[in-house]
């Protein structure tokens, strides 16, 4: 391979890595904006812990649990050995011989490491304003350190899902649904925030304290998705990368429109938060097949994801579950939809592919639900998951961090 092409590929992958890293700013802004002022420090602390702890865990053993692949004749379910700790570049890891000239070993590690933390970030938004910070930190260590790499290896590490023909380009299931399943179990075990449901069980809105910040968060996430999906091409291939960016953007726009139109018809008001979640739903929905779809198909997938968002948010409320940022609707429901859409639209569409996608969704779902119940169930029994009523009412910032994100300044 020409040295210039190898360099160009690697530079694009490093830029994509930076964009995915920047998504954590978007997640933080979105979660802060859709929750109350008194819990801002707590949310920021969780998100900073996720990216720092997640990267260290991925360095310690997560990367080697996922890559470079399974040995011939193995089950394709889990690979682990005593030499799996830490990272060290293999022979030719810095040359075009590694990864078909798309990037170096170090770039590979960092790009994948940025993905690893995203699953726990999804959970953070769902459990906001009522989970004990210690319990959440322990959960993050186990989920990012073990559960995510094991599931990722099943497809991206050449495991059994890959051998079956399961397809997930950039992680509608392997990232977003992995986080979404955990979020669903977590909000079930935690219970709803005080005041979320009235005496008749009807859901009541708990407004976030900064919708402008939430809006900025969504726009940052959209920008970051150019790296999330565009980087998943794993090279700077001009044709495929540009197609992926086009399908990603069109799905996001269509998702926003789908959610806006349906929510307006149903609720008779132009709900900005539903519009924003529709954009995110479109992004999650296209992620599994962004490289396979035409622009027209991307618009359909995104629009239907936006429609699903509105129904999913209503369903979560009807089930008496409390999800402050709509994480279950966005990441779980639209993650499932995007994965199944690979069998309906695009280059791989067909009945056999659809069933393979469905089996993959179900297997990952069962594994993540069982693991999350074990982790959070144990934490609930040993140390408790939820803060006290007093702490929840007065705010987690003061009780768990001893500070206020917006202190009142008194002029002397």
Image: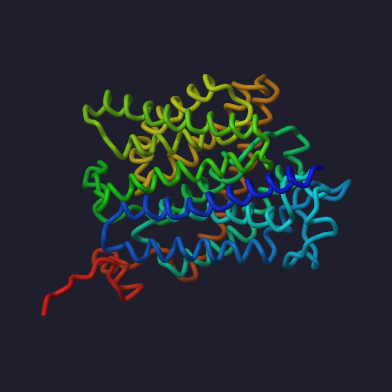
Q: Position of residue 191 (x, y in %)?
A: 37, 54
Q: Residue at x 61, y 37 (%)?
A: 361
Q: Which residue appears farthest toward the left when viewing the image?
A: 412
Number of dots carrying numbers: 0
Q: Nearer the viewer, residue 41 or 411?
A: 411
Above or below residue 265? Residue 201 is below
134 sits left or right of 148 in the view: left
* Residue 171 picture quarter: top right
Q: Which residue appears farthest toward the right when viewing the image?
A: 73
Q: Nearer the viewer, residue 186 or 151?
A: 151
Q: Residue at x 70, y 58 (%)?
A: 106
Q: Position of residue 125 (x, y in %)?
A: 41, 53
Q: Position of residue 15 (x, y in %)?
A: 58, 49
Tell me the quadrant of the picture where the N terminus can be found. Answer: top right
* Residue 162 picture quarter: top right
317 sits left or right of 351 in the view: left
The colour mode here is: rainbow
62 sits left or right of 192 in the view: right
Q: Residue at x 67, y 34 (%)?
A: 167
Residue 380 makes an appearance in the image: no
Q: Position of residue 316 (x, y in %)?
A: 38, 40
Tell me the quadrant of the picture where the C terminus can be found. Answer: bottom left
Above or below residue 352? Residue 93 is below
Residue 218 makes an appearance in the image: yes
């Amino acid at each position: 391979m020409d040295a210039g092409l190898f360099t160009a590929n690697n530079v694009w992958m490093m830029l994509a890595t930076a964009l995915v890293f920047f998504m954590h700013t978007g997640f933080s802004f979105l979660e802060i904006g859709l929750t109350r002022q008194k819990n801002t420090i707590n949310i920021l602390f969780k998100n900073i812990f996720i990216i720092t702890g997640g990267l260290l865990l991925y360095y310690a053993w997560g990367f080697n649990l996922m890559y470079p692949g399974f040995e011939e004749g193995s089950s394709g379910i889990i690979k682990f050995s005593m030499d799996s700790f830490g990272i060290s570049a293999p022979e030719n890891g810095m040359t075009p011989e590694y990864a078909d000239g798309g990037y170096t070993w170090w770039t590979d590690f960092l790009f994948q490491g940025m993905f690893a933390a995203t699953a726990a970030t999804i959970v953070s938004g769902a459990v906001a304003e009522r989970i004990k910070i210690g319990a959440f930190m322990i959960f993050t260590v186990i989920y990012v350190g073990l559960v995510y790499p094991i599931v990722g290896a099943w497809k991206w590490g050449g495991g059994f899902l890959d051998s079956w023909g399961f397809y997930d380009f950039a992680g509608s299931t392997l990232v977003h649904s992995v986080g979404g399943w955990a979020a669903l179990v977590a909000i079930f075990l935690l219970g709803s925030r005080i005041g979320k449901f009235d005496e008749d069980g009807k859901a009541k809105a708990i407004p976030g304290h900064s919708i402008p910040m939430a809006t900025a968060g969504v726009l940052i996430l959209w920008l970051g998705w150019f790296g999330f999906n565009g980087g998943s091409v794993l090279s700077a291939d001009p044709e495929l990368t540009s197609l992926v960016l086009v399908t990603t953007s069109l799905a996001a726009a269509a998702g926003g429109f789908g959610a806006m139109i349906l929510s307006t018809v149903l609720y008779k008001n132009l709900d900005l938060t539903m519009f924003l979640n529709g954009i995110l739903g479109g992004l999650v929905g296209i992620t599994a097949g962004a490289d396979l779809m035409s622009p027209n198909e991307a618009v359909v997938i995104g629009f239907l994801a936006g429609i699903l968002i509105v129904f999913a948010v209503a369903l979560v409320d009807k089930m008496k579950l409390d999800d402050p940022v709509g994480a279950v609707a966005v990441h779980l429901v639209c993650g499932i939809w995007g994965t199944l859409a690979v069998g309906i639209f695009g280059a791989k569409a067909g009945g056999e592919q659809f069933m393979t996608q469905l089996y993959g969704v179900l297997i990952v779902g069962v594994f993540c639900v069982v693991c999350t119940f074990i982790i959070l169930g144990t934490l609930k029994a040993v140390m408790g998951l939820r803060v006290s009523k007093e702490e929840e009412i007065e705010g987690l910032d003061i009780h768990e961090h001893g500070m206020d994100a917006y202190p009142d300044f008194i002029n002397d």
